Image (cartoon, rainbow, N blue to C red):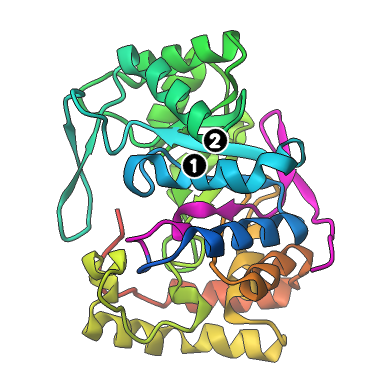
Amino acid sequence: MTERLLPTRRLGGLEVSALGFGAMVLSPGVYGEIDDERGERALLAAVDAGATFFDTSDGYGADGHNERLLGRALRGRRDEVAIATKFGFRLPEGVEPHPFPVGFAFGELAVNADPRHVRGYAEASLRGLATDRIDLYYPHFPDPEVPLEDTVGAVAELIRDGLVLHLGLSNVTAAQLRAAHAVHPVAAVQTEWSMWRPVDPELLAAARELGVGIVPWSPLGSGFLSGAVSEVKEGDFRQNAPRFDAANLKANNDRFAPVRGIAAELELTPAQLALAWLLHQDEHVVPIPGSRTPAHIEENLAAGQVKLSQEVLDRLAGILAATEVAGGTLL
């Protein structure tokens, strides 16, 4: 695969490629089984296609699997990339779980962002990633039992000590972003945002006011916006998402047919249109699509070069405003 450059964007003080890579898809039990050799090929394909921003979490895969995979694959290319990871989800033994409600079938996640544990989380991630610094570090979810400002204060200590370079927040409200930013500058906020999940307008407004970048997770609607999902098989986490049950998935495929039609007109894949659309929403948006296939990775990252006309953006806005997604939200 030929090495190529993508446009860059800024997440606060961190400069990264306009499209990053979400590595969650490379751990077993997410979209079914996958082996590490295939996962490492996917990560290197993303670097070769121009991605310089890689997103993971200590909670992706068993025992930090995703971080360890990323660390091995990028060991020889660490200085070419920025690595973001998250903490406080899938807790180590002895750490008390705090329930965080979600819209998946299982109803809640176990989190703990107590500042007493944050340094230990970071040190474990550094070992797994085989690196001496984390470029962007997020609490994965705001802990309902811990003031977010206290968690942020613990990350600020890691930044002071050089273990972390930039603070991020994930799955927060506008009010939480403002409160955290008052303790320490926030570089980026990660939130679900795609053609089938609008961003919270108050969160977007706060991020713009504070100079905080936005990292949309699930920018392809957990693969739905690629136009290739007709069923969800055993071992796929999307079986827990009401949007992907058989009836809702059929309804959603029918409702998004006009969007796929515009992609065909423009000679783009549906995924490329969905990603290009996100990039046109704000100059500090950096989506993180993930894929297991080098050809799809290259295809997705090519969306960073796509220019959409105002006429196309207006047509898409009209379609999306009139389209109700069946099955509620993912969170």
Q: Magenta includes 37?
A: no
Q: Position of residue 7 (x, y in %)?
A: 80, 53
Please give the name of the residue rendered at 54% of the width and 65% of the height, measured from the top-left corner: 38
Q: Quadrant of residue 71?
A: top right
State the SS at label 1.
Answer: helix
Q: Quadrant of residue 210?
A: top right
Q: Position of residue 205 (x, y in %)?
A: 53, 40
Q: Which mark is residue 225?
A: none
Instruction: Give the residue type that dot 1 points to.
Output: Arg
Instruction: Give the residue type that dot 2 points to.
Output: Leu
Q: As drawn, is 125 to the left or to the right of 44?
A: left
Note whether residue 56 is visible.
no
Cα distance between the residues tagged 1 and 2: 5 Å
State the SS at label 2.
Answer: helix
Residue contact at pointers 1 and 2, CB within 8 angstroms: yes
Please give the name of the residue rendered at 60% of the width and 32% of the height, measured from the top-left corner: 209
Q: Position of residue 227 (x, y in %)?
A: 49, 83
Q: Where 320 sits versus 202, above or below?
A: below
Count of numbered circles on the image: 2
Q: As drawn, is 112 to the left or to the right of 19?
A: left
From which residue to which does the magenta span run?
Answer: 1-30
Note whether residue 41 is visible.
yes
Residue ID for mark 2: 129
Residue ID for mark 1: 68
Which residue occupies the foreground of this view, 204 or 224?
Answer: 224
Q: Where 230 sits versus 158, above or below?
A: below
Q: As drawn, is 330 to the left or to the right of 306?
A: left
The answer to which of marks 1 and 2 sits earlier in the sequence is 1
